[in-house]
Amino acid sequence: MTKSKDTEKTYILRDDGSLSWLLFHTVRVLRRHGAPGYSQQRILGMLEEMGPMSQKEVQEILNIQPGSLSELCAKLEDKKLIERKRDENDRRNVILNITEKGRKKRREILKQKDELMFETLQPQEREQLRGILLRLAENASKKDDIDLIDQTEQLKGGHR
């Protein structure tokens, strides 16, 4: 959904039977209605899960332009959610680390998003969904290197 002062466009959900499309669409819509600063949340999440990292590593993993990442990190640092320090072994590198305040803020954001996103589900349905999504995530992580184009061609009986 794109909003402007004068107009509002709404993307109409059409169920074509594709679970992957439905999941993608749901995540896209829910993310749009989540807490602001999605890129900042991604940085906090990565630092919390993976520990201190160089700014260059974060840039490469999240596919963020260097200037954009610097700006995002400055905002997070101003809010005392991360720390930036020069690498003692290579002064050209900046090491990012999440602070305790950053960890607390991330938990608050995740709780708010869960409440917003899944308010329509009963507690039992939420747990079922959690189990299904965990299985999907585990399976997807095993298939990280699969070339989906090759796989699609094989399913159609084509050759590359």
Image (cartoon, rainbow, N blue to C red):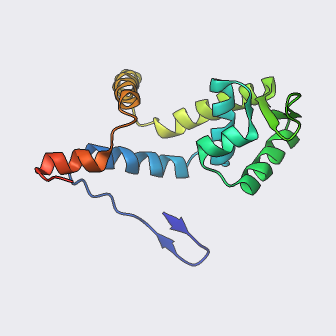
Location of residue 106 with respect to 71 vertically, above or below: above
Measuring 27% from the left and 58% from the top, which residue is drawn there? 14
Q: Position of residue 127 (x, y in %)?
A: 39, 21
Q: Is residue 98 above or below residue 61?
A: above
Residue 86 in sight? yes
Q: Give the answer, above or below, for where 80 lies relative to 132.
A: below
In-front residue for pair 97/1: 97
Left or right position of 150 against 72: left
Count of labels in the image: 0
Which is more toward the observer, 62 or 109?
Answer: 62
Quarter of the rendering occupied by the C terminus:
bottom left
Q: Position of residue 157 (x, y in %)?
A: 10, 50
Q: Position of residue 128 (x, y in %)?
A: 34, 23
User: Does 93 sit left or right of 104 as displayed?
Assistant: right
Residue located farthest toward the left when viewing the structure as drawn: 157
The one nearer the camera, 48 or 11, is 48
Q: Is residue 17 visible?
A: no
Please name whichever residue, 28 or 92, is drawn nearer the observer in this view of the structure. Answer: 92
Outermost residue, bottom direction?
A: 6
Counting from the top left corner in percent of width and height, residue 116 is at 53, 39
